């Protein structure tokens, strides 16, 4: 029995609210149960110096947790003098995931920055950030099309992410904090809408897990990401 009472293959309640940030070119509040992440896209008509005159655009991301997004207050990273290794790893993952489904050449020399701020954390903040950022990015690209900066939205596919793990000897989908903190193994899966694999991060916390168990986690992840992609399409008005 899961602490939440969910079935093994059941996502948390998922809400992707587009247009949450008034001033951003694209935004989405991604709610995976009690995990809430605000994803905001900013369009800049320039690219990093190392990409100038390449004819290509760039998509990058920043990630952070608000001090009271967790049970006890965490100091702001700026106050500690710099980002943690975890923060850097997560924001690079978000950026890689979005670039995997973006035609950078079709962007022209335009950069889009995704700011992912964790308002409330209950497990799966990086997966919520990736899933919500796709919505924010799509909306920002549509804004560019409307303004005549691009001919068409330069996205080749959807991308979403979900966690799976082994909890009390059972493979389960979309771990919340109660499960993630005591899981025997956990993994984050980033897939495209057509089923392509962008990244898989898996770790055994106790004993190693078997290839058969990994296959079960993959199957759960595919089911979850299919549902998340449907929620994305609804959020951006494609369904």
Image (cartoon, rainbow, N blue to C red):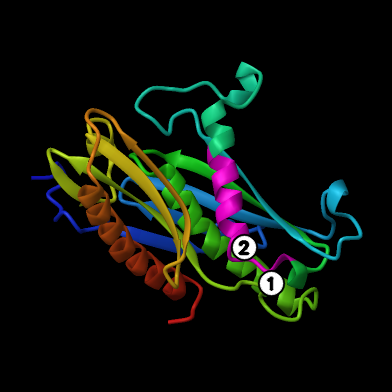
**Nearer to me, 99 or 43:** 99
Residue sitting farthest toward the left: 1
Q: Position of residue 89 (x, y in %)?
A: 55, 36
Please tell me in which quadrant of the rendered image residue 136 appears. bottom right
Q: Identify the mark at residue 122; answer none if there is no mark.
A: none
Q: Position of residue 86 (x, y in %)?
A: 51, 31
Query: Looking at the image, do the residues carrying marks 2 and 1 touch, with CB atoms under 8 Å apart?
Result: yes
Vertical comparison of 168 with 226: above or below:
above
C-alpha span from label 2 to label 1: 8 Å
Q: Position of residue 10 (x, y in %)?
A: 21, 58
Residues drawn in magenta: 90-104
Secondary element at image label 1: helix
| Image-based side of 4 in relation to 53, left or right | left
| Residue visible at 33% across and 59% down in the picture | 14
Q: Which residue is mark 1?
A: 143
Q: Which residue is mark 2?
A: 26
């Amino acid at each position: 029995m899961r602490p939440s009472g969910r079935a093994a293959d059941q996502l948390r309640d998922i809400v992707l609210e587009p247009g949450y940030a008034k001033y951003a070119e694209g935004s989405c509040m991604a709610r995976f149960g009690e995990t809430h992440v605000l994803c905001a896209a900013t369009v800049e008509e320039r690219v990093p110096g190392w990409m100038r005159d390449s004819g290509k655009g760039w998509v990058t991301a920043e990630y952070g947790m608000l001090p009271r997004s967790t049970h006890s207050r965490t100091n702001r990273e700026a106050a500690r003098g710099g980002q943690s290794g975890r923060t850097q790893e997560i924001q690079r993952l978000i950026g890689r995931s979005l670039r995997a489904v973006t035609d950078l050449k079709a962007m022209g020399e335009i950069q889009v920055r995704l700011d992912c701020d964790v308002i409330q954390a209950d497990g799966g903040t990086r997966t919520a950030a990736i899933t919500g950022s796709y919505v924010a990015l799509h909306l920002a690209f549509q804004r560019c099309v409307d303004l005549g900066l691009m001919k068409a939205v330069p996205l080749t596919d959807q991308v979403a992410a979900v966690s799976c793990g082994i909890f009390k000897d059972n493979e389960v989908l979309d771990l919340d904090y109660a499960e993630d903190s005591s899981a025997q193994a956990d993994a984050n899966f980033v897939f495209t809408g057509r089923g392509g694999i962008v990244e898989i991060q898996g770790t055994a916390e106790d004993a190693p897990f078997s290839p058969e168990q990994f296959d079960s986690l993959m199957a759960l992840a595919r089911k979850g990401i299919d549902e998340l992609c449907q929620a994305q399409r609804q959020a951006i008005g494609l369904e």
